[in-house]
Amino acid sequence: MTQPTPTLRGNNIRYADFDTLCEALDYAATCETGFNYFDGKANIKTVLPYSELREKAVELAKRLVVFADKDARIGLAAVSTPEFAIIFMACQYAGLVPAPLPLPVTLGGRSSYERQLQRMADTGDFHALFCPASMEPIMSSALNDQAIPVMTFEELENLPAGEETRPFNKDDMCYIQYSSGSSSSPKGITGKQSTVMANCHGISKYGLQVVENDRCTSWLPLYHDMGLIGFMLTPMVSQISVDFMDPNDFTRRPISWLQLISDHKGTLSYSPTFGYELCVRRWRRDRELDLSSWRAAGIGGDMVRPEPLTEFEDLFGDMGFVRGAFTPSYGLAETTLAATFAPMGQGLLKHTIDMDRYERTSEAVEATELTKPEHRRTFVACGKVLPEHVIEIRDFDDNVLDGNKVGRICLKGPSVSPGYFRNTQATEACFSADGWLDTGDLGYWLEDQLVVTGRFKDLILWHGRNIWPQDIEWAAQAAAPHRCGRACSFAMGGIGDEKEIMLLLECRTRDPQLLDEIYKAVMAAIRLEVGVPVKLQLVPRSTMVITSSGKLSRARVKDKYLKGKILDLQADSPLDIVSTEAS
């Protein structure tokens, strides 16, 4: 029976203190740890020790050196298999720049996926695209008008081999990481060897404070920075074993994620808030779990919502989950991955503020017993900035703010990307000449910890108030949790106070009576909790546009709505719905 790689290295721990990924894998290959791939029922499928990963990567690199010139870009389908890790590292040894690409299932349809892929291929100027044989037809179709060869993983074995590798040095590029496109078209973020190693070092030594018996467990997609950097590269360069589960398997069987942690004594594992929420919803009390080994249950990738996390704590606390294990953090692909981490063992540091005061003054003032319930909003602190990095909260005149004043989150440090690949305009808009990154996020300080409140572009200004679309969406979902799915709120038309605030809410029913009940319950909740006039439209499931990292793209949902491509369940007849969906 196949056994996963051990937790203990069999060699001295090193905290990503290398110049390049190749140097890091050279050392990891002297250890006994590695990658392990499991199916949806938490059964082991394949084991890839770091020694074998290096051997296969070097062998393939000698073929890739002959195949393409140094620094050529390679589009690489980011499947959760050993082949992805081998080809990614082969590119490092061959001096080629891999660009991990999202998979079709996450982008809501073939045509949408093909458009995304075409934009990525255009901006990345790919020399070739590598993918599993099962994905070759859709990849070739997407690149039909471009002279970019699409090759299967199996075909790479038939490339002629050279004698030498051509590894990157510390000043070279490492990869192109595509942004998720939550508010715009995907941009290729340049990862250099130096920025990647700096972030991996900060994560392992200071953020997660890695120890000898740490073991990672991950279902996160490898085309997203939290999956690629957080749970493939950082563990590899820190010689930690990783237990992988395919994201699609997680969606179908989320409890298998917890089963892996329980079976193999996982200590480090991350998820956006919705992953923990899904586990609560799918728990059937049909097995015994021991989650006592899980010392850092990270939260990242989207806004940290305290309510679902508290439910997770309450439910799985009986199975050994420690309340202090929750580790909120903040980061983005433009700073490789991580910028802040909550102190180990702190858990959820909650801060409930007076939203009425906040919307009028942009100050995060703590709620008191006099604050009306509908004006309360609880945020979670995302921790302290990593060493050698600096965060400033600035107003829109670039004045630095302190205390509880909300402003733009700006960041500087060795992990910050040099910019977007061959996109000078976008780079100049976000990166300053002296190394500062304007993240596009808003936040404030809770003593020495960062609190993130949302993205500036999503903010709705109405009658002198700053309205967060998340507040509207969460109020709607809470009003009918068992019959509704995702929600999306945005402003449209008019100037200033003449704007109309739109709310789209996915429903799991098409029964007219139930839809009417949902409509009334949601509108009542919005009036009570948010207090702004909202135009509500109930829509079918899978209406929302979701980015490759699982985030809601409000900009693209709005565009879809304005183009008349979203159905109104209370206005359209069943015949209209069927015919439109079929088209």
Image (tube, rainbow, N blue to C red):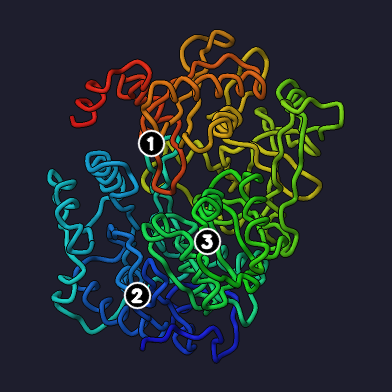
Left/right placement of residue 331 relative to residue 493 reads right
Measured from the top left, where is residue 535 in percent x and y? Answer: 49, 16
Mark toward the start of the polypeptide (1 vs 2)? 2
Mark toward the start of the polypeptide (1 vs 3)? 3
Specify the farthest residue to the bottom: 10
Q: Residue 93 shows which numbered tag?
A: 2
Left/right placement of residue 152 relative to residue 438 reads left
| Local crowd size for mark 2, using a 10 Å CA cut-off: few (<14), some (14–19), many (≥20) | many
Q: Which residue does the image show at 28% across and 49% down from the upper left?
A: 104
The kind of residue on which mark 3 rests is: Thr
Q: Is residue 250 above or below residue 244?
A: above
Gap between marks 1 and 3 measured at Cα: 31 Å
Name the residue tied to disc 3: 195
Q: Quadrant of residue 68?
A: bottom left
The kind of residue on which mark 1 rests is: Val
Of the pair 324 and 90, the residue shown nearer to us: 324
Q: Which residue does the image show at 35% across and 15% down from the upper left?
A: 571
Tag in front: 1 or 3: 1
Of the pair 428 and 262, the residue shown nearer to us: 262
Gap between marks 1 and 2 measured at Cα: 37 Å
Residue 362 visible in the displayed image: no
Q: Is residue 434 above or below residue 537?
A: below
- The quadrant of the image that shows the N terminus is bottom left
The kind of residue on which mark 2 rests is: Tyr
Q: Which residue does the image show at 70% across and 23% down from the upper left?
A: 359
Of the pair 430 and 258, the residue shown nearer to us: 258
| Local crowd size for mark 3, using a 10 Å CA cut-off: few (<14), some (14–19), many (≥20) | many
Mark toward the start of the polypeptide (3 vs 2)? 2
Judging from the image, what secondary structure is the residue with disc 1 in? Answer: loop
Name the residue tied to disc 1: 545
